[in-house]
Image: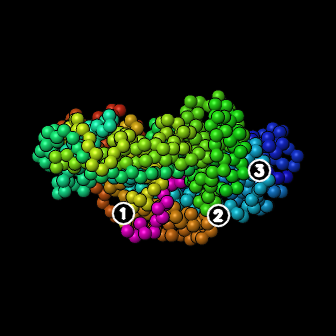
C-alpha cells in the first residue's frame, strides 16, 4: 500500500480527490491501493529539559548547560489521536510519499514521524507549488526520490536543535542571573527572536537620542509659457551640511529677501534623461508582507494567513512561503493557461489580457535565481473571486497584478533637472513626464511602491538654456531634520530579510551575502508575534516600539547573542546543510560548544537590570519594587523583610511589562 503523508487535512482532501481516493476513513482517505493521511501541523515536538531528567524541572545555574546526548521528541498531547492513526498506516505501508508543504518545516514534520515510527521502506517526495487540480496532477507525475529532499530535514533539525540549545540554556541562565539582582521577570532569549528585538531597540534608541537640527529652505513658483511649477533654492557652497541643507538662518533670510525683489529667473542648465523601469518581480512572501503592511496596514501574520487561504482554500495562488520572486523558465509554457484562467475568473480583465504581449520575457523568468520555490503567482485554473473576503481580494489583486505586469512594456518617463539664476541666487527644479505607462496600467492605484514628492512628479514646461521664467512666489521655510521612523511590522520584515546591510562589523560584513537574512519566510511573522505576546514590543498605531522589558533584555545578554550578524551567519550555515555542504552533527557540535562557553563565561556575572519604578510603600513611604508570588506580580517594599508593605499592580503599562511569564516561554525561536 502506498501512503501519502500530508501536512493538513485540507491538503489531504485535495490530493485524495485527484488520486481518486474517495472513501473516507478515520483520519484518512483510501482508494485502490493508496491511502492519504495527514498531520495537523506538527504532531511531534522537541522534548523539554525535564524529559532528560527530573532535576531539570527546577531551574538552577549549576545544571547548565543542558546539552542532550541523544535528542528526544514527544507526541503532542493535543494531536495524539491523529498520530496514532498515522503510525498505524505507516506500519502497513510498502511505499510512502511525503506530501507535506514543500519546505524545511514540511520536510521535518514528515521525517520526524517516519523516524519515530521506525519506517525503513522506500520514500518519494511530492513537491507541490499549488493546490489546484492541474498542479497536483503535474506534481504527482513528477515525484522526486526521497533522498533529494533529505538535506531539508537535516537543515530543519539543525535549526530546531540550535533554537532549543540557545532558548533553554540562555533563557534560564539570564533569568536566574536577573533574579539574583532582584529582577522578577523571565529574560527570554532566542536565536532569532533576540537579534530581531535588538533591531527594534536600536531603532527606538536612535529616535530617543536624535536631536533635531533646524535648517532653512526657500520654495518658489516660476512660470514659463503659461505653465507654473515649483523650484527650490540652492544654498551657496560653504553654507550647507552634508545633505545640502542650509543651517544658517541669516543666509537663507537674506537670499529670500533678494529673491523677492527679483521679477524673473534665467535658465542656466537643462538636462533630460529617459528612464525605463522594469516591472516588479512577482511576490515572495516577505515583499508581500512589506507591501500589505504599507498599503493596507495588515499585520505580517494576517498577510501570511491571507496568502495561505488564497493557496489552500481558494486555490487561487501558488505556495505562499516563498523566498524568491523569480519564475522557472519551464513555466513560460503555462502562460496562456494562467492568463485564460485570470480572464475567466474576472471577465473585466479580458480587454487588458487580450492586449498583453505574451512574447515579452521579463527578468522574472530566470532559472538561476529560483530557489526551492518560485514567486507567488495565480494558478492554472479560474478562481472564484466572489468567495474571497475584501482583504483576500485586495491581496489577490496585488499578486495578480505583479504577474500581469510581466507582459507589459517598461514604464518610461522623462526626468528633467533644470537650474536657474536670479539676482545672484541659484535655483533648481525637477520634473517628470510619463512617456509610456507600461506595467503601471495594471497596478492597483494604491500599490505604487515609491511615491515621488510633488516637486519631482510635476511636469515642467519646455525649457531651454537662457530662457526666462517669471518668479511669482517666494516662501522662506523654517524646517527641522527628522528622526528615524519607528519600524512598522512590514519594515521590520524587510530589515530581517536584508540584515546584512545593517551589519557594521567588517568581518561579518565580508562574510555575509547581501541577501542573507535572519529567520525564514515561514517563521518571521511568528517571531514578531512572539515578541508581541511576550511584551517585548508593543503596537503604537502602525508602528511597533520596544518596551522597558526589551531594553532590559538587550542590555543584559551578550552582544553576540543579540547581534543580527551572528544569527545571519548561522542562517548561512543552515543553507549549507540544506545544500549538503555541512553536516547536521558538525553544526550542532559547534552550537553546543558555543553555548557551553557562554554559560561558563556568564555563570558568575552580576547583571545590572533596571527595575520598574513603583509607588511609595503604604506603610513606610520607601520605594517599592516588583516581586512575584503565586497570584502574580505585585509591588513590595524595597525594605522587605524589615517592612512588608505591598500594593497590587494595576493594569498599567509598567505592571504588564513586569508580569512574570510561564517558564515554558523560554523555548523560543
400 and 322: which is toward the camera: 400
**Label 2 environment density (alpha carbons within 10 Å; few <14, some 14–19, many ≥20):** many
Is 260 magenta? The answer is: no
Tell me where residue 542 appears, x and y as whole percent: 40, 38
Nearer-N-terminus badge (2/1): 2
Q: Secondary structure at mark 1?
A: loop
Task: Say whether residue 566 is left or right of residue 373.
Answer: left
Residue 68 shows up from this direction? no
Q: Which mark is residue 504?
A: 1
Residue assigned mark 3: 138
**Spatial distance from mark 3 to mark 1, Cα to Cα?**
46 Å
Task: Say whether residue 631 is left or right of residue 117.
Answer: left
Is 512 magenta? The answer is: yes
Stretch in magenta = 506-529
Write down the quadrant of residue 576 in the picture. bottom right
Q: Secondary structure at mark 2?
A: helix
Task: Say whether residue 517 is left or right of residue 330.
Answer: left
Residue assigned mark 2: 151
Residue for point 45% across, 40% down: 294
Amino acid at each position: 500500500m502506498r501512503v501519502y503523508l500530508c501536512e493538513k487535512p485540507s491538503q489531504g482532501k485535495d490530493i485524495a480527490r485527484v488520486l481518486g481516493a474517495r472513501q473516507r476513513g478515520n483520519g484518512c482517505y483510501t482508494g485502490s491501493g493508496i491511502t492519504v493521511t495527514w498531520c495537523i501541523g506538527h504532531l511531534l515536538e522537541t522534548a523539554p529539559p525535564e524529559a532528560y531528567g527530573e532535576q531539570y524541572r527546577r531551574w538552577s545555574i549549576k545544571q547548565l548547560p543542558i546539552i542532550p546526548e541523544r535528542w528526544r521528541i514527544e507526541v503532542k498531547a493535543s494531536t495524539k489521536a491523529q498520530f496514532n492513526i498515522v503510525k498505524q498506516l505507516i506500519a502497513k505501508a510498502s511505499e510512502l510519499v511525503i506530501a507535506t508543504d514543500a519546505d524545511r518545516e514540511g520536510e521535518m514534520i514528515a521525517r520526524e514521524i517516519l523516524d519515530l515510527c521506525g519506517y525503513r521502506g522506500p520514500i518519494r517526495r511530492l513537491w507541490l507549488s499549488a493546490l489546484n487540480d492541474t498542479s497536483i496532477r503535474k506534481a504527482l507525475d513528477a515525484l522526486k526520490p526521497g533522498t533529494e529532499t533529505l538535506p531539508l530535514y537535516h537543515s530543519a533539525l539543525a535549526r530546531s536543535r540550535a533554537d532549543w540549545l540557545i532558548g533553554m540554556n540562555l533563557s534560564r541562565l539570564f533569568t536566574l542571573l536577573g533574579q539574583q539582582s532582584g529582577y522578577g521577570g523571565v529574560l527570554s532569549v532566542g536565536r532569532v527572536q533576540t537579534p530581531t528585538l535588538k533591531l527594534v531597540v536600536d531603532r527606538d534608541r536612535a529616535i530617543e537620542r536624535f536631536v533635531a537640527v533646524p535648517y532653512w529652505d526657500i520654495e518658489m513658483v516660476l512660470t514659463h509659457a503659461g505653465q507654473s511649477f515649483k523650484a527650490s533654492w540652492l544654498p551657496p557652497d560653504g553654507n550647507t551640511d552634508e545633505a545640502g541643507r542650509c543651517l544658517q538662518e541669516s543666509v537663507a533670510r537674506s537670499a529670500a529677501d533678494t529673491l523677492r525683489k527679483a521679477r524673473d529667473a534665467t535658465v542656466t542648465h537643462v538636462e533630460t534623461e529617459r528612464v525605463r523601469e522594469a516591472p516588479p518581480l512577482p511576490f515572495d512572501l516577505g515583499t508581500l508582507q512589506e507591501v500589505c503592511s504599507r498599503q493596507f496596514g495588515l499585520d505580517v501574520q494576517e498577510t501570511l494567513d491571507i496568502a495561505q487561504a488564497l493557496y489552500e482554500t481558494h486555490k487561487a495562488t501558488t505556495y505562499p512561503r516563498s523566498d524568491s520572486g523569480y519564475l522557472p523558465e519551464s513555466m513560460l509554457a503555462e502562460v496562456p493557461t494562467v492568463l485564460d484562467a485570470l480572464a475567466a475568473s474576472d471577465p473585466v480583465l479580458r480587454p487588458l489580457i487580450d492586449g498583453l504581449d505574451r512574447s515579452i520575457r521579463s527578468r522574472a523568468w530566470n532559472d538561476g535565481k529560483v530557489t526551492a520555490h518560485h514567486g507567488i503567482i495565480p494558478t492554472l485554473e479560474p478562481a472564484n473571486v466572489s468567495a474571497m473576503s475584501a482583504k483576500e481580494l485586495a491581496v489577490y489583486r496585488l499578486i495578480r497584478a505583479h504577474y500581469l505586469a510581466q507582459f507589459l512594456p517598461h514604464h518610461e518617463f522623462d526626468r528633467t533637472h533644470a537650474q536657474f539664476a536670479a539676482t545672484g541666487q541659484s535655483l533648481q527644479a525637477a520634473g517628470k513626464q510619463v512617456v509610456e505607462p507600461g506595467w503601471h496600467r495594471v497596478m492597483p492605484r494604491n500599490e505604487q511602491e515609491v511615491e515621488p514628492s510633488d516637486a519631482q512628479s510635476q511636469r515642467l514646461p519646455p525649457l531651454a538654456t537662457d530662457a526666462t521664467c517669471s518668479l511669482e512666489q517666494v516662501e522662506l521655510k523654517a524646517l527641522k531634520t527628522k528622526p528615524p521612523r519607528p519600524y512598522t511590522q512590514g519594515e521590520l520584515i524587510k530589515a530581517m530579510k536584508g540584515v546584512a546591510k545593517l551589519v557594521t562589523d567588517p568581518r561579518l560584513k565580508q562574510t555575509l551575502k547581501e541577501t542573507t537574512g535572519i529567520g525564514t519566510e515561514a517563521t518571521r511573522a511568528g517571531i514578531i508575534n512572539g515578541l508581541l505576546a511576550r511584551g517585548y514590543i508593543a503596537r503604537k498605531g502602525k508602528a511597533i516600539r520596544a518596551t522597558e522589558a526589551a531594553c532590559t533584555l538587550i542590555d543584559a545578554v551578550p552582544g553576540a547573542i543579540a547581534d543580527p550578524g551572528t544569527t545571519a551567519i548561522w542562517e548561512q550555515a543552515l543553507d549549507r546543510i540544506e545544500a549538503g555542504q555541512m553536516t547536521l552533527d558538525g553544526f550542532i557540535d559547534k552550537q553546543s560548544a558555543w553555548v557551553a562557553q557562554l554559560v561558563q563565561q556568564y555563570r558568575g556575572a552580576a547583571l545590572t537590570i533596571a527595575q520598574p519604578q513603583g509607588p511609595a510603600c503604604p506603610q513606610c513611604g520607601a520605594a517599592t519594587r516588583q516581586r512575584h508570588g503565586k497570584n502574580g506580580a505585585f509591588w513590595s517594599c524595597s525594605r522587605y523583610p524589615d517592612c512588608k508593605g505591598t500594593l497590587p499592580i494595576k493594569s498599567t503599562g509598567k505592571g504588564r511589562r513586569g508580569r512574570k511569564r510561564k517558564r515554558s516561554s523560554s523555548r523560543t525561536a
